[in-house]
Structure formats: structure tokens, C-alpha cells
Image (tube, helix red, strand yellow):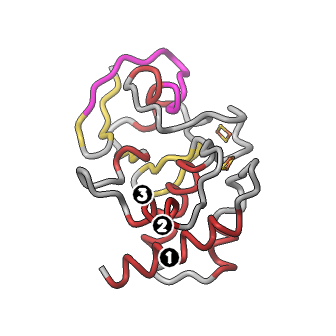
């Protein structure tokens, strides 16, 4: 039995040997906000936070999350209130097909935790391994900038 924290709640879940974190989140815990794209650590779609750091959950054995804190896209909103990044992605029209967006937002959330006012280049670097097949990069970068402003002003 694997014990970990998911979005602030203590969770105990049965996992198969070698089962990856993305599969545990999606298929055992029903947290389908985390998407799986390439399933081979290439696209960033499956990014979640492990103790606040972005990790590729498709390639992280779930056992490595034992006793640690996992945050998924479902854990960002506060009740009914969207996280400023989620709001900004909607307002800036940064969501096209939407498939990459949970990974983009989780990666950006980690960035804004360590850097409150990143410029365009810093955002581009932070998101460089999180691919968007719809090529929505300009609006994604605008959304991260807008969220940074909104987090600063509260
Ligand atoms: S699905 Fe994990 S990196 Fe592509
Ligand atoms: S919005 Fe479609 S892959 Fe990024």
C-alpha cells in the first residue's frame, strides 16, 4: 500500500510494482486532470508537482512519491475559486485543445513559486519542455505574465 499526500489529503492506495504516478493519479485516484501524452518523458503533458517541484508523472514510479506531497491541477483551485494561473489561461485565450494545459499550468505554478516576476525569456525557458501541439505559446506566455501580476497584487 502506497501512502502519500495528494492535493493536501493523506491518501493510501494499492499500486502495482513499477506502476507510474500518472497512472495511479488517473486510474486509481480518478484525478484525470493530469493528462498523458507521449508516455515517455518527452512532452511534459503529465507534469505534476512533487514536494513543489515539477516532475513527469508518466515516468516517475509511484513508489517514489511515498510520504511526499503531490499536487495536481485539481489541487490548485481554492474551492470554487480558480488559481490565478487558471483564470489567466482562460482570460488570455491560452487554452486551445487544452490537452497540454494542466502540464503548462503546473510547470508555471512551480516557476511562480520561486520567481514572482519572471520575464518572457524566463517563462519560455521554464516551459520549454512542455510542448503544445496547438502552438499556443504566445498566449500561454501572456497568461503566465498576467498570473504573476495578479498574484503580486493579490
Ligand atoms: S506524457 Fe509524460 S512527458 Fe509526455
Ligand atoms: S492547447 Fe492543444 S496541445 Fe496545447
Residue 126 covered by magenta stretch: no
**Above-or-below relation of 22 to 141:** above
Relative to residue 125, is residue 115 drawn left or right?
left
Residue drawn at x 55%, y 38% is 57
Query: Vertical placement of 85 versus 57: above or below?
Result: below
Helix or strand or loop: what does disc 2 sit on? helix
Q: Quadrant of residue 141?
A: bottom right
Proximity of marks 3 and 1: CB atoms separated by less than 8 Å: no
At which x and y percent is residue 31? 41, 32
> Quick check: marks 2 and 1 in contact, CB under 8 Å?
yes
Q: How many marks?
A: 3
Front of the two marks 2 and 3: 2
- Looking at the rendered structure, the secondary structure element under dot 3 is loop
Give the magenta-colored segment's residue range.
11-23
**79 up-or-down from 11: above or below:** below
Residue toward you, 97 or 69? 97
Residue at mark 3: 52
Reading the image, the residue beneath label 1 is 146
Residue drawn at (46%, 31%) of the image: 32
Q: Seen in the image, is 78 located left or right of residue 50?
A: left
To which residue does mark 2 refer? Answer: 88
* C-alpha separation, residue under disc 3 versus residue under disc 1: 21 Å
Task: Identify the image quadrant of the C terminus.
Answer: bottom left
Could you tell me how far apart the alpha carbons at marks 2 and 1 are, in whole angstroms? 6 Å
Amino acid at each position: 500500500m502506497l501512502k502519500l499526500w495528494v492535493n493536501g489529503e493523506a491518501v493510501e492506495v494499492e499500486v502495482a510494482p513499477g506502476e507510474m504516478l500518472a497512472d495511479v493519479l488517473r486510474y486509481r485516484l480518478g484525478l484525470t486532470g493530469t493528462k498523458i501524452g507521449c508516455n515517455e518523458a518527452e512532452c511534459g503533458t503529465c507534469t505534476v508537482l512533487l514536494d513543489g517541484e515539477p516532475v513527469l508523472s508518466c515516468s516517475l514510479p509511484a513508489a517514489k512519491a511515498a510520504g511526499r506531497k503531490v499536487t495536481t491541477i485539481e489541487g490548485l483551485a481554492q474551492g470554487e475559486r480558480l488559481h490565478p494561473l487558471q483564470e489567466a489561461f482562460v482570460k488570455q485565450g491560452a487554452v486551445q485543445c487544452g490537452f497540454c494545459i494542466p502540464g503548462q499550468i503546473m510547470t508555471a505554478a512551480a516557476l511562480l513559486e520561486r520567481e514572482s516576476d519572471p520575464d518572457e525569456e524566463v517563462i519560455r525557458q521554464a516551459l520549454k519542455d512542455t510542448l503544445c501541439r496547438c502552438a499556443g505559446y504566445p498566449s500561454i506566455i501572456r497568461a503566465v505574465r498576467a498570473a504573476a501580476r495578479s498574484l503580486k497584487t493579490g
